[in-house]
Image: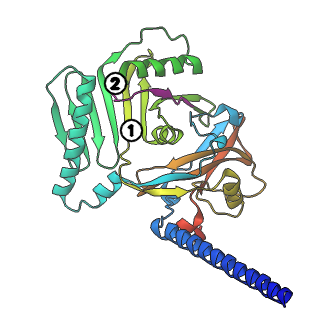
Amino acid sequence: MLKLKQIFQKRNFIVYTSILLICCMIIYYINYFKNHTTEMISLPMLTIEDFHEYSEPEIYFAYDISEIYNGNPWKPEWNISELPAFYNTSYKNYNTADTYEQKINVMKQKIISAQKIAQNFSTAALYKMIYGSEQGSIENEELLLSINTHNDIINITFKNAISLPFAIEQQNREQLEKIIYHFIDTYKYALHWQEGKDALSFQYDANGIGHFELIAYENGDTLEKQFLNYHFNTVSIILNQQNQITSFVITKTDISDKIENYPIITEEQAQKLLYHGKYISTSEYDFSENMPIVKTELVYKATTYDSIFMPYYKFFVQVPGIEQNGLHCYMTYYVPAIKEQYLKNFSSL
């Protein structure tokens, strides 16, 4: 009789334990589903914007892809799991300004910001301001600042070119990077930068002539900030034939209107999507498997036309059989880096 009672007790223990385990599993899956659903709902859906029909083809020429560089700090080993998307504030402000007076008000705000910048680069106090609904300028005896309502770019021209404190024997990578860091050291406080980095750019034109672009950007205290500053907080330095600084272009894009952080895919996942035709491009050639991928970058597509700034994988692809003056031809194809469940029109690519 005692043995029978022990058997029942053992069976009850197994039953109760099984019920408890089942309940724990149900609670776990309910919480998982709840959190997963909340994540999906809480992230606004984004639209992939494609302007290839009225954009110039993005073409690169080089004898070898290693000759093309632009200072992009991104490296695959960063293992970034998410990046933010932003509304293009300039695009929004201009396109929601319906009347002439509203557009003038948009320009007035840009003029105010530009005047603060001008004061950091000039000792002359008297300014002449001209502005309309599309373009505006600030000028004194030392500087001319030009702005427009479509973007956050300010062109600053020195009335007297700035000579360098050292000689430039020839325009090569080492010498031009030296100029960039001289500019950073001289003007970083005027730009409100803590620290700057160079992003010297080089590529050939179709005639085989090499072209440098002297670019600096504010460094960041995190990899994400550094990456964002490279795309949204830069200065392009312009030299004359005497290697004097004649002007520079400040790009200080307003990314204060953040949408949200979004999970992103890996380079390998993006490459698979490229092979499945899930890309946008200004190239006249459809991507095919016989076109070798020679370089990949993670970038923000941030043109004047983009209402949303979001990350893409940019694939440099060599077009077989096309050469210009012995130079290989490379086209670019962009694959959205944000996971497809957050993209409204991903299926239509």
Whether residue 183 is in magenta: the answer is no
Residue under pointer 2: 189
Which stretch appears magenta? 190-201
Toward the left, the furthest residue is: 126
Work out which residue is located at the far bottom of the displayed protein and give it.
Answer: 1
Residue in the image at 49% along x and 28% along y:
197
Amino acid identity at mark 2:
Tyr
- Image vertical order of residue 103 relative to residue 348, above or below: above
Residue carrying label 1: 251
Vertical placement of 32 versus 80: above or below? below
Is residue 289 in sight in this rendering? yes
Tell me which label, 1 or 2, sits earlier in the chain. 2
Q: Is residue 273 left or right of residue 262?
A: right
Residue 225, position as x, y percentages in the image: 47, 40
State the image quarter where residue 142 is shown: top left
- Residue 256 falls left or right of residue 298: left
Question: Residue 185 at what x, y percent from top left?
Answer: 41, 19
The answer to whether one can see residue 310 in this image is: no
Label 2 element class: loop
Q: CA distance from mark 1 to mark 2?
A: 16 Å
Q: Which residue shows up at 15% across the image and 32% down it?
A: 128
In the depicted structure, whether residue 35 falls above or below residue 250? below
Tell me residue 340's x, y (percent).
59, 65
Residue 19 vs residue 258, the one in the foreground: 19
Depth check: give the residue in front, 51 or 274: 274
- Asked whether residue 200 is drawn in magenta, I would say yes
State which mark lies toward you, 1 or 2. 2
For image coordinates 63% across by 46% down, the residue present is 79
Q: Amino acid at mark 1?
A: Thr
Percent position of residue 243, x then y = 45, 16
